[in-house]
Image: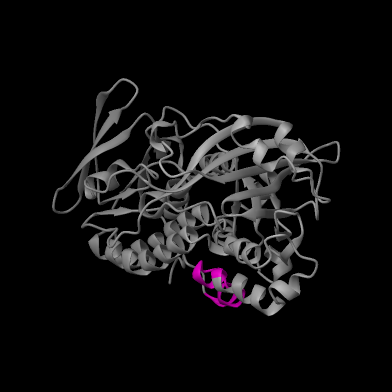
Amino acid sequence: MTVLIAGAGIGGLALGLSLHQAQIPFRIFEAVSDLRPLGVGINLQPHAVRELFELGLETGLDRIGLRTREVGYFSAQGDEIWREPRGLLAGYNWPQYSIHRGELQMLLLRALVERAGSEAVQFSSAVTAWQDTGDGVRIALQDRASRTDTGMAQGSLLVAADGINSTIRARLYPDEGPAHWGGTMMWRGITRGPRFLSGRTMAMAGTRARKFVCYPIADLEDGGSLINWIADLEMPKGHDWLKQDWNRPGQRADFAPQFADWHFDWLDIPAVIEAAEGIWEFPMVDRNPLGQWSFGRVTLLGDAAHAMYPIGSNGASQAIIDARVLTQLLHERGAGPEALAAYDAARREAVNAVVLANRGDGPDRILDIVAERAPGGFDDIDAVMPLAERQAFADGYKKTAGMDVQALNSRASLVRIGA
C-alpha cells in the first residue's frame, strides 16, 4: 500500500508527513539533488496552519516565521482603505504566518526525516513515466543532471506534487501548453528595513496595474524588520514573458520608477526598493482549472493540480489542505482509485473556484474598486466604499477560500486517525 509521491515541495512533504501520521507507507521522489531554502516570503492561512499544528509543527513555525496580526489595503496615495485583524486576533483558533517559503520547506523536510528516516525522500529522481500494473503503478526515474535512467519503483498510487510545470500533468494533458499569463510581471525582494504599522502587518497598496505588497518575515536585532516585498506592474500587450527566465535577477530600473513617489507616512516604498538585498523577476502565472485530477491510480496535488496567482495568500495553504484531505480518504478507503476519485470530488471544484477568484484579483480587487470611484484619492473612505461593503467583500473571499472563521473553528479535523 505504498503511495509514491513525485516532488518534495510543500505539498509533497505535507503529504508525506500526513501519511506517516496515518501509518500509510509512502516514498517521495525529488528531481533535484538536494533541497535548499530557496524562494521568498509567503503567508500561511489559519486553515493550513491548523493542519501543520496537528502535525506537531507549531514550535517550528514560531521559530522561522512571524504570526501575522493584520492585513491592510491602501490607495496609491498611501491612504487606508481597509484593515482587519488576522489569525488569532480575527477569532480563528489558529494564527496566520508570514514566513520564508524555503525555510518552511526545510522545516517540513527536517520533520519528515526525523520521523520517517532519510530514505523517505529519494533525490535526483525525477518521475518521467508510469504504468498501471492492474494492482498498482510502476514509475520510471531519471537523474535530470546526467540524463540517465535510475531505475523503477513500484507502489499502489502515484501523486503528482511536482509543481506548476508538472511533468505528470503534462502527460495527462499533452495539449495544455504553457502556464497562463495574465499580463503582470512581479519583482520580489527582501529588505532590512523599519518596522511599519503593527510590526506584523501585511500591506497591499495601489491597483492591479501597479501594486506594492509588503510584510515582515523576521524581526531584526536592531528593532527593524526583514521585509518581504512584491512590486507588480501590468505589461503592454505582446510583452515577451515566455523568453525570460522563471527566476532571474531583476533590475530596479525596470520597475522602481513607477513607485518613485510612493513615500507613505507608514513606509517609504522607494527606500525599501533601493535597500533590497536581492531582487528577482517572475511572471505572474497560473494554470487553467481542470475538469479532472485523478486518473485511475494517478492524481495531482498542489500547484500541479491548481497553480494560482499569488493573491490572497492561498497557494501553499491549499496544497497543505490537499495533502490532509487525501490522507484521510486513503485512510478510509485504502490506497486505490476509489480514494483518488473521492479526493478529486472533494477538492477540485472548491480549489478551482479559488484559482478563478485569484485570476479576478481576489481580495485585492478592493483596490481597483476604490481607485475607480476615487482616482485622485480620498479624504473619507466611507464616502467612497462604506464599511459594510468592505466587510462583505473581505468575507466573500474567505468563504471561497475555505477561511470562514466559524466554519473553520467548528469543523472536525481533516485527518481523523481511528475514525
Magenta span covers which residues?
397-411
Q: In the displayed structure, does residue 395 sit left or right of residue 134?
A: right
Nearer to the camera, 327 or 384: 384
Scheme by which the image is coloured:
one colour
The percent position of residue 209, horizontal first and vertical second, equals: 57, 51
Direction from residue 270 to residue 43 in the image, left or right: left
Residue 10: % across, % down: 48, 46
Q: Is residue 94 magenta?
A: no
* Residue appearing at x 44%, y 31% in the figure: 245
Tell me which corner region of the image, top left, top right, bottom left or bottom right, holds residue 293. bottom left
Front residue (pair 87, 283):
283
Is residue 158 shown above or below 328? above
Q: In which quadrant will I find the C terminus?
A: bottom left
Q: Is residue 204 above or below residue 145?
A: below
Image quadrant in which you'd find residue 164: top left
Whether 407 is drawn above or below 46: the answer is below
